[in-house]
Each structure stands twice: as C-alpha cells, then as structure tokens.
Amino acid sequence: MAVAVLLAAGAAFLSALAVVFQRVALESAPDTGALSPRLIVHALQKRGWLAGFALLLGTFVLQASALHFGQLSLVQPVLTMELVFLVAILVIGFHRSVGRREVLGIVAIVAGLAGFFASASPAVGTGQPGSTGWIAVSAAVIAGALLLVTAGRIGPRWWRATALGASAATIFAYNAALAKTMTWILGHGGIISLFETPDPYLIALSGACGLFVLQGALHSGPVTASRTANVVVNPLVSIVIGLTAFGERLRSGGLFIALDVLSIAILCLGIAVLARSPLITGLSEEYLATAPQPPVLAAQPD
C-alpha cells in the first residue's frame, strides 16, 4: 500500500507541473473553439506544451506502476494531491503567498484522503474484468464522456470548462483502469501477450482523447472550473469502476459507509476550496500576463 501511495503522489506532482506548463503555453492560442484541432496544432508548436506532455507521459508511468501495487480505489484518490502540489509550485515558482483558503483546502484534502483510507480500507478484488465487464464499462464511459462534451459546447465559459474537465476526467479514469489491466497482463504473460490484446491500443486511444478534451477544457474557461471537475470526477469514476468491474472491496457496514461518504465529501470540499484559491485562479490570462515567471517557464520565443 505504501509503495502505491508514494508512486501515486509522484504522479500527482508531475501532473501538477504539466498543468502549469501547458496552461502557460495555451495562453497565446487563438480563439478557435475549445475542441478545435487548431488548438492542438498551436500547442505542438510550443516548447512549454511539449514539456508538459513529456511530464504527462511520466505521470502515466508512475500511475501505472502505482496501479500495479494498489487498487483503483486506493491509487486514484491520491491523485487529488495534484492541487496541493500545484499550490506549492505556484508559491515557489511564482513567489505567491499562502493564505487561510489554501491552508483550509490542503487540510481538507489530506483529512479526506486519510479518513477514506482509514474507514474504507480498500482491498484487492476478484481480479480482472471479463469481456462483458469491459464492454459495459466502455459503453458507460463513452456515453458519459460524449454527454459531457455535448454539454460543454454551450453555456458560459465556466460551465464549458467544467463539463469538458469532467469529460476528460471520465476518460482518464477509464485509461487508468486499462493501465491496471495492462500491468496484470505484463506480470502474467509478458510484453508479447500484451500486444495480442486490445489494451495497449485502447490506452493510446483513450489517452489521446482525454488529452485532447483536457486541452479544450483548459482553453475554454477558467482553470479553476476545469481542474476542479477533473480532480473530483476522476477518483469518483475510478472508485465506481474498481468496485463494479474489478470487484474491489471497501469495508462494509453502515457506519463505515457513512464515514466513506463523509470523507469523500470533505475531500471534494477541499478540492473545491483549493481550486478557487487565488493561487490556482492566478493561472488565468490576466495573472500570467503580469506575474513574474520562474526561470523554468521563461522559455525562449518560439
């Protein structure tokens, strides 16, 4: 369990770094629509965005390694630490100060995680999903992601960012489930047997789709909305997939279930509070236009 948590925390840190790099790179993107292919073309021309993409690849490696040692319902909630690391990066890199809101948000996230792990005590389930289970999970994820993308095509900027962020989170939760299966296949059959299954191809496809939707979320509205939705929805969807498809077990009993719900609520509250922090909202265009950038972000003109 400890190894899985440490690896997941490392993945959360790299993900936070990636958000900063990619958000800065997308500030100069033309307003061509949240899900326009031209947005990706613009991003690929920016060294900062490419650096963020490399960090996302590192995030996937650490996350897959964590899923090899732990369950979806254990690893994915730890990724909510991304916002805590994001605050630390902005404090150190952008020389901002921490206020009461940031402290309360961080305390709530840590307390919610600790409470969930203590009450739920996630345990290994019945094994890998069968073909029927994967079909059901895939259908549910595709339907949910498309519904959120459709909802994110209209409405105010904060709503578009929220809907697209939630859609990306749903896809990434599915990607994490595939990664967990991939580690199981590698451990039992080797790399040759892995490529005889659809898993690596589905991982690449879902990862590319999730990344595309995430860039749209970052570009379509406040980073507060997109990151809050992304960080909240991902672990919740992962827990559902873990309990249903993978048969993972949480501690039973009315009291423990109530404590689980309370812990998740505190965790989500902490995420919402921290995501609305001036440090996080400081990633907006107005802030980045005037804030001093740390040397690592002060890239030479492209």
Image (cartoon, rainbow, N blue to C red):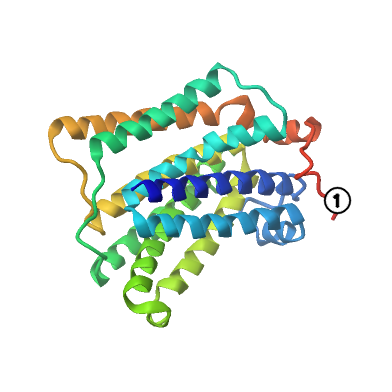
Residue ID at (26%, 45%): 122
Measured as percent of width and height from the top left, residue 195 is found at: 43, 80
Residue 159 visible in the displayed image:
no
Total labels: the figure holds: 1
Residue ID at (80%, 44%): 298
Residue 272 visible in the displayed image:
yes
Say which residue label 1 marks.
Answer: 300
**Figure quadrant of residue 279:** top right
Measured as percent of width and height from the top left, residue 285 is found at: 73, 36
Three-letter code for the amino acid on which mark 1 is drawn: Gln
Q: Which of these two is toward me, 111 or 136?
A: 111
- Looking at the figure, which quarter contains the C terminus? bottom right
Residue neighbourhood size for the residue with mark 1, other residues' Cα within 10 Å, grouped as few (<14), some (14–19), many (≥20): few
Measured as percent of width and height from the top left, residue 175 is found at: 43, 60
* Element type where label 1 sits in the image: loop
Q: Which of these two is toward me, 49 or 2?
A: 2
Residue ID at (72%, 28%): 95
Decide if residue 80 is on the left or right side of residue 138.
Answer: right
User: Which residue is outermost to the top?
Assistant: 100
Measured as percent of width and height from the top left, residue 272 is found at: 48, 30
Q: Which of these two is toward me, 277 or 163?
A: 277
Residue ID at (52%, 41%): 82
